[in-house]
Image: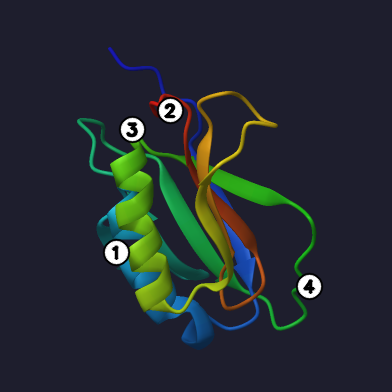
Amino acid sequence: MDRRLFDHIDLRVRSLAEVERFYSQLLPALGFPEFCRTSIGIAYDAVRDHPKPEFIGLIEDPEHRPNATRIAFWAETKEDVERIAQVVEQAGGRNIEGPMFCPEYSSTYYGLFFEDPSGNRLEVCCRAALL
């Protein structure tokens, strides 16, 4: 049985209207395709053989101020990072850096760094990329 490493992430955003288009493209590409509205925001569930799979929740907070915290999502391959980079660009990601090798992290680290429309810092990385 696969062990779950997290239950959910509640991510604050300034405006759901501002980020909904972005996340409706990004999160399914990252493996969270199931969309639902909740009493406090919107959520994207992973697809798992579990009654309540892990999910990313977006909660509107007009006072939200982004900070230096970064959420990094795993990609299996360098090609997956590159595919998701195209999604991020088309969805309106901001301050995009990469995809690129980052040898300062490890010799096989390949990553994409970007911000959502609310300024939250995100990343997609692969640590098994071939040089």
Q: Is residue 3 above or below residue 10?
A: above
Q: Residue at x 34, y 66 (%)?
A: 87
Residue 110 visible within the image: yes
Does dot 1 land on a helix, a strand or a loop? Answer: strand
Q: Look at label 3 and name its amino acid.
A: Glu
User: Where's residue 115, x and y in %?
Assistant: 60, 67
Q: Residues under labels 4 and 2: Cα distance?
A: 37 Å
Discs 2/1, front? 2
Whether tag 4 and tag 1 are in contact, CB under 8 A, the answer is no
Q: Residues under labels 2 and 1: Cα distance?
A: 36 Å
Residue 37 visible within the image: no
Discs 4/2, front? 2
Whether tag 3 and tag 1 are in contact, CB under 8 A, the answer is no
Discs 4/1, front? 4
Q: Which mark is residue 127?
A: none
Q: Residues under labels 3 and 1: Cα distance?
A: 23 Å
Q: Which mark is residue 35?
A: 1
Quadrant for the N terminus, please.
Answer: top left
Q: Residues under labels 4 and 1: Cα distance?
A: 25 Å
Q: Is residue 91 above or below residue 44?
A: below
Q: Residues under labels 4 and 3: Cα distance?
A: 31 Å
